[in-house]
Image (cartoon, grey):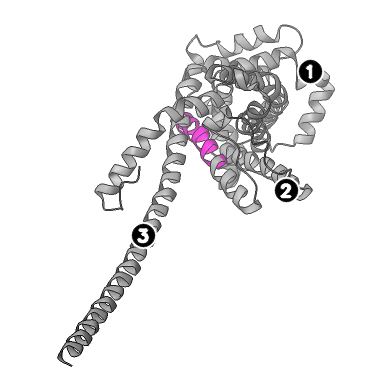
Amino acid sequence: RIVRTKTEAAAEAARTRGSRLVRTVTEDSIALEASRQAEAEVLQLHASTEESVKVAYRSTGLGIYAVVMRFAGMPLERLAMVLNSSQVSGQGQLSQAAKIVFADGAMAPFRTVGRASLVAWFLQYSVMGCVFQVCDRALSRLLGVRCIPYGEELMRRPDESAAPMSPSEQARAAGKVVLAPLLSGCIESSVSNRAEAQRFYGIDKLAAVEAKLGANPVARALGPGFAANASRNFIMASSSFVVTPVLYQRLYPQEKKDAQSLFWFGLGVNIFAGNAIAITQQALWGRALDYAAAGGGRPISYAAVVREGLAAEGSAAFITPTKWVARVLMNAPVQGTLPWFYNEVLPLGEGRVLGAARQISAALGGGPRAV
């Protein structure tokens, strides 16, 4: 009996210890799972924060690049503005424009650049890049379609294993690739058009035209010729952020893909597609500003601008080889190289920026240093 009693007691003690061990292991497992879930939430927050850091970095880089390139190209910009206006006509338009641009000396084009232009250049390209990225991501999630390829994605083969898109998916994708650059172009013009008008007229003349027009605060902030400016920027945003990357990824020979080929491909699309269409809107904008300045200042009627231009010069009022070349010389150095800079140069520093952001987040107690 004594032996049985001791055996039973030992078995009971073993069962008790086993039960406690099971409870401990279960509690530890629950605690570990809760910890993992909490860490996953923190890492998800980090992923969201990193997306914001990427957008800010890319947008800032585009803005700085644009300021340097646009200021250096001011003589070409002023030349293109005058050529694409009603201030020149007939034969020898290039020489006519050059006389107007450099009437006050070789540095005259740079004197039309005020602080508003420097800020506008930075915001114009940083906002264009930022808004396009935000719109592309938001619309892609909303409509259930893929984002426009970026960076290393351009160098990979297109995913041919994916199922063909249904007509509904094709319609949503088409709507997104129109809406994203449209919103980007309109917002870009809202921060750049008035500064462009200032460089077109000169600082004093713009002030005089605005005073005569007596526009409301919103119209004054947007500047004269906003609609034509936004139309042009929509075309150029589509060229840089949609047409170039999509065509390059899908159609360019895979064995020839590299940074140099992307540079020249983007430049070619900009020159022979983007600017060939945008030149008509650039000419419309220039003629609209001339129309607005007539008589000291009057509201723009685009129908009247088009009608008068066609009556005076036919289609040459809006597109000629000279106007196209001037536009290309002004725009291609920055806009044509934008896909290359955006997809090849900016990614070089993205890892360091993200690493610095993670270090700062960890130092501030924002969570673990995710690598």
**Residue 268: image x %, image y %?**
65, 18
The answer to whether residue 205 is left or right of residue 360 is: right
Which residue corresponds to mark 2? 169
The answer to whether residue 130 is left or right of residue 235 is: left
The residue type indicated by label 3 comes to: Arg
Q: Quadrant of residue 14?
A: bottom left
The residue type indicated by label 2 comes to: Glu
**Residue 143: image x %, image y %?**
66, 51
Can you say which quadrant of the picture contains the N terminus? Answer: bottom left
Structural distance between the alpha carbons of marks 3 and 2: 37 Å
Region of the chain picked out in magenta, as a range: 114-132
Check contact, mark 1 vs mark 2: CB within 8 A. Answer: no
**Residue 156: image x %, image y %?**
58, 29
Structural distance between the alpha carbons of marks 1 and 2: 41 Å
Residue 297's disc number: none
Which residue corresponds to mark 3? 36
The residue that appears at 22% across and 87% down in the rendered structure is 8
